[in-house]
Image (spheres, helix red, strand yellow):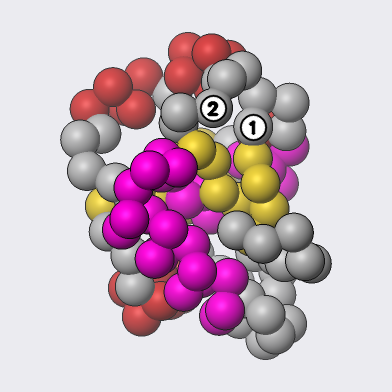
Amino acid sequence: MSEESTRLEAIGGENWEALVNTGLSVLVIGKSDCAACNTWSAELTEQLAGDEFFPSVKFGKMLLDQRGLIGFKRASPWLAEVTDLPFNVIFRDGEPVKKWAGGGVERLENRLRRYVD
């Protein structure tokens, strides 16, 4: 993820709760050495460059190989079952409502449409 302005916010131990508890949000979970994760992150960052892609939805990217995520891991028992990365979670008001592995803007768009008012 580049340092320029992006709607795909870097998420860590200090800000994950703010993301997941904000109405409708998408959390992309990966690792820094995961090629598929980096490809999906770049694709999503490009899609989010404009303001027209689900403007009311917050997007965040969390790298599991960073420090300080113990609070998130404790609050997310489903994370222990995640075996494939990247992994995406749609949260509505703090609750995970949809989870899936893999990338793809079209797949994300189809899933988000079910939750956007």
In this view, the residue in front, 62 or 71, is 62
Quadrant of the rendered structure where residue 35 is?
bottom left
In the rendered image, the quadrant that contains the C terminus is bottom right
Q: Secondary structure at mark 1?
A: loop
Question: Is residue 88 placed above or below 116 in the rendered structure?
Answer: above
Q: Mark 1 or 2, which is nearer the eye?
A: 2
Left or right, residue 46 beside residue 33: right
Q: Which mark is residue 12?
A: 1
The segment highlighted magenta reads: 18-47
Amino acid type at mark 1: Gly
Count of residue discs = 2
Residue sitting at x 33%, y 65%: 103
How far, Cα to Cα, is label 1 from label 2?
A: 8 Å
For label 2, the residue is 66
Residue sitting at x 28%, y 22%: 80
Q: Which mark is residue 107?
A: none
Label 1 crowd (10 A; few <14 / some 14-19 / many >=20): many
Asked if residue 40 is among those painted magenta in the image, a careful observer would answer: yes
Residue sitting at x 60%, y 51%: 60
Instruction: Single out the residue that lies furthest toward the right.
Output: 5
Q: Position of residue 15 (x, y in %)?
A: 73, 33
Image marks 1 and 2: residues in contact by CB distance under 8 Å: yes
The disc, 1 or 2, on the residue closer to the chain's N-terminal end is 1
In the rendered image, the quadrant that contains the N terminus is bottom right
